[in-house]
Amino acid sequence: MSTDKRKAKLLKLQERYAQELPGKVKEIFVTWEKLLADCDNAQLWELMIRQPHSLAGSGTTFGYPDITRIARELEELVKNSQQDSQSKGFASKVQALIIELEAASKLKPQEATLAPSSTQNQSKLGGKHAQSTIYLLDQTEANDPTLTKQLSFYGYELIAFPDSKSLRQAIQTQLPCCFIVKIAGDYQQSFKQVKQLKEISGNNTPLIVIAKESSTELRLLAVRAGANAFFDEPFRSIRLIDSLDQLTERGEHTPYRILIVDDSQATADYYSLSLQNAGMETEVVTKPLDIMRHMVEFEPDLILMDLYMPECSGGELSELIRQQEGYVGTPIVFLSAETNPEAQIDAMSYGADEFLTKPVRIRHLVAVVKIRVQRFRQVKSLIVRDSLTGLYNHTHTKELLERETNLSNRNGKPLQFAMIDIDHFKLVNDNYGHPVGDSVIKILARLLKQSLRSTDIIGRYGGEEFAVILPDTNEKEAEIILNKIRQDFSEIVLTSEHGDVRCTFSAGIAGYPALKSSADITQSADEALYFSKRNGRNQVSLSQQEEALSTGTEE
C-alpha cells in the first residue's frame, strides 16, 4: 500500500472516529447515571474509569487533544473519589467534565499524521542503495586484488577509488551497500573524511574502517566519525564478510512483523497504518482471547498491546503469552493512557519490556519498536542460527520442516525437502586447511541464499551438510532448482595459498504429498542423498516415493 493510500485510509479512520465520538461520550454519561442510582456497583465504577481512559488514549491520536485532556481529568477524578463518592462537589465535577467532553466531541479535529515513510530517510544523493556494491577508499595506496576477489566469491562487487573526490562523484549516481575506508598517515584527517562520507550519504550507509594498527583511542575516533565496524590488519577475510553480511542485512532484510492488540479497532488501525508506513508488516487483534492463534500464524517480532481491555487486561495476556515456551523472549510493549509510574511498573512486572503512555508520539513509537525488534532478532539469531554461515541450525531447521509439513497437510500444497552434502569435504580440510574448508561452506551457503526464493528455508544441518525447504514446489521443480545450484557451485574456484579449490555437492529430495510427516520426509531425503553419493556424487536424486508419485506407480 502506498503512502498516499495510507493517508487516505487514515483520513477515513479519523472521520469514523469523529462520527463515533459523540456516542462514546454518551456511553460515559449513561454509565454515570447508572452509577448515581447504584453507587456500590463495582462493575460500574470500573466502567466509569475505563471509558474515559480509552478516550484519553485515543483523543489526541485522532486530532482531539481536548478530549484527551478532559477524559484524563475525569478518569483521575473518578479514581481518587471511588472510596469517597459522597465528597462535596464530586458529582457536579463529574457532570461538568462530561458536558465539556460533549462540547469537545462536536469540534472539528486537527489533522492526524502517520509515521514518516521508510523511504523518506534515504539520502537525496544517489537514490537507492546498490544491493551488493561496496565502495573502497584506500588511503594506503596499496592495490590489493585479493580482497576484491575474495569479496566476489560472496556476491559483493568491490569498486576502489584513489581519492575522496572521485568517490563523491560516484555517490552522486549510486549509493553503495557499504563503504570501506583504509586509513593511513594523519588519522585526524582520515576520520574527518570518514565523517563526511557518512554525512553526504545520509548517515544510513554502513561504513567499515581498516587500519594498520589498533588502539582504544583509534577505535574511539572511528566511533565518533560514524564507523560501524573496525578491523586492524592483518585480518581474515571471513570476518570482514561476516561484518558486511550483518551491516547490509543481505538476505535477511525481512520487514519487522508487529502484532497489535487493542480492543479499539480505530486505534489499532491507526498504529497499524503508521508502522506500515515505516516499512513494517502488521496484524491487528481486537479480541484479546484470540491472540494465541495469531501468534502461531503471524509469528510476530513484537507485540504492541493495550493495557486496559474488557475481556482481560494486558497484564494477564502478557502472563498467558510468557507461559508459552516459544514466546518467552518475544518483546511486549504496553500502550496505555496510564500515567501513574507505580501502575506502569506494576504492569511491566507481568512480562512487558516497555511502557508507552498514550497518546504516544508516532516517531517515538516507531523508534522503540525498531530498537526492540533489532535486539530480539539478534538474540534469536544466536539461538536458531549457525554461527559460521548465518543459516538456520539443525534443530531449528527440523522445527521449520515440521511446521511447513503441517501447513502443507492443511492446505494441500506441495512441499519439497532437499538434503545437500559437499563431496569429499574431508579432503578439502586435509589438503587446504580448515579456514579454506570454512570458506567453501560459506560460499555454498551464500549461493543457496542467492539462488532460492525469500520464502524458501535454508539450514546448515551439520558439518558440510545443508538442508533446504521449498514450499509450494513439486519434485520436478525442486530437481531443476537444485541441479542449477549444483552446476553453479561446481564452477566456483576458490583461490588459496595451496592452490585453487573446486568442489561439488550431492543432494537428495523428498516431500509432500508423497510423504505426510516431516520424519518420513527427512528419512527419505537422506536415503536419496546417499543414493547420489553411491551413484558417483555431484548429482541430485529424488526419493523412491517421489519417483513413484511422478510416474504414477506404486511400490
Image (cartoon, rainbow, N blue to C red):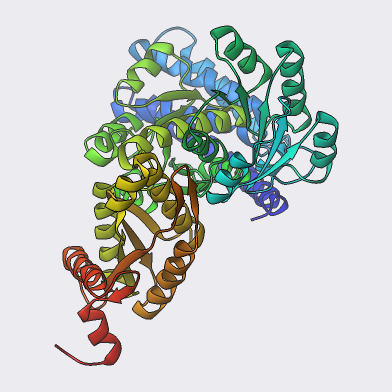
Q: Is residue 251 left or right of residue 156?
A: left
Extreme left residue here? 555
Vertical arrangement, residue 45 with respect to residue 527, above or below: above
Q: Residue at x 72, y 27 (%)?
A: 198
* Residue 484 appears in view: yes
Q: Residue at x 75, y 28 (%)?
A: 197
Answer with the quarter of the image where residue 58 lies: top right
* Residue 306 appears in view: no
Number of numbered discs on residues: 0
Q: Nearer the viewer, residue 301 or 520?
A: 520
Q: Is residue 93 left or right of residue 320?
A: right
Q: Residue at x 69, y 35 (%)?
A: 143
Tell me where residue 365 appears, x and y as whole percent.
55, 30
Tell me where residue 479 appears, x and y as whole percent.
38, 75
Tell me where residue 248 appears, x and y as whole percent.
57, 40
Answer with the quarter of the image where residue 195 lies: top right
